[in-house]
Amino acid sequence: MFTKNTSKVGDAVIVFICVIFIVICLAPILNIFSRSVSSSSALVSGRVSLWPIGFNLDSLKMVWEDPKYTTSLGWTAILTIICTIFSLFITVVCAYPFVYNNLKGRKFLNGALIFTMYFNAGTIPNYLLMKSLGLLENPLVLIIPSCLSVYNMILMRSFFYGISDSLRESAEIDGAGPIKVLTSIYLPLSKPVLATIALFYAVGRWNGYGDALIYIIREKQWFPIQLLLYNIIQNSTQSIEISRLEGFSLPGVSESIKAATVIFATVPILLIYPWLQKYFVKGVTLGAIKE
């Protein structure tokens, strides 16, 4: 039999393992933050690891005061909100009809949606499609093509399946139509999955830059913050390679600016996690039957 001391040792081992994983996850973030608030000489000499050396806020202040960054950040925040709301709406509208077993073409529609999750036309056909639709250099190209994730739709559909049919049938007996059933029963009971999927969409849009990189080239006012960060890192990397070939070194401030830009682009989305965390652990009563 296990003794109390054995149980304490086991708990201590689990806590130790969890602490190790936490440190591994936090180390890259601490490194980036330290680089953003360290002096140029410390960065050039490679002395910055997890703790800042020569602490200063010049790089963060420079990024914050640059309208290029603040404008891009504001546009990315607006874009993320619009995409999240629109994608949630499309996901709910797509998943909800599947709760009706008498839906005509139910199996075909389900198979067609899943097919698109595994097979894609490719970059060039997608580019030609966006061009023919007139979406190139258009902010709508960042919203419409990625408005639905089939994986998220399957999550939503599976959650809807877990809600008792008796609730829907009772509402229908009382005269509620499909839209009333959705807004009065399914959506109120689906807050946890709605919050989770909203977080998936928000993080995906906030971190996304591939579509903007391909479809938006000249209209820089539509650049999301991640694309701006990508360009900064790419230009800086190319400049460093050129400097090495020509035999001179660049000042460490460029590294500090890159790190400050990463912090600038990462902190806002990190602040959303605690706000939605309660929905991940909050239970909901499913399967209740109206008497």
Image (spheres, rainbow, N blue to C red):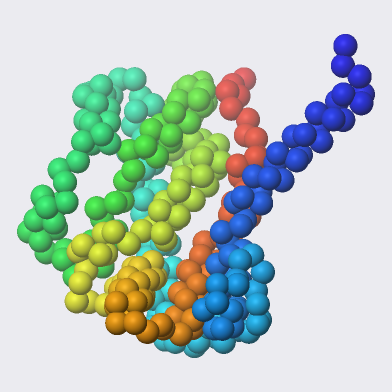
**Eyeballing the image, is 216 above or below 186?**
below
Q: Quadrant of residue 244?
A: bottom left
* Quadrant occupied by the N terminus: top right
Viewer-side residue, 191 vs 83: 83
Residue 49 visible in this rendered orientation of the protein: yes
Extreme residue in the top direction:
1
Viewer-side residue, 282 vs 222: 222
Taking the image as shown, residue 258 lies to the left or right of residue 18, namely: left
Extreme residue in the right direction:
4
Q: Residue at x 65, y 74 (%)?
A: 52
Q: Position of residue 140 (x, y in %)?
A: 25, 63
Q: Residue at x 29, y 82 (%)?
A: 246
Viewer-side residue, 55 vs 138: 55
* Quadrant occupied by the C terminus: top right
Viewer-side residue, 74 vs 186: 74
Q: Quadrant of residue 236?
A: bottom left
**Eyeballing the image, is 196 above or below 203?**
above
Taking the image as shown, residue 34 lies to the left or right of residue 181, namely: right
Q: Position of residue 278 (x, y in %)?
A: 65, 47
Q: Residue at x 59, y 79 (%)?
A: 42
**Eyeballing the image, is 70 above or below 271?**
below
Q: Position of residue 53 (x, y in %)?
A: 65, 77
Q: Position of residue 127 (x, y in %)?
A: 13, 56
Q: Residue at x 21, y 24 (%)?
A: 108
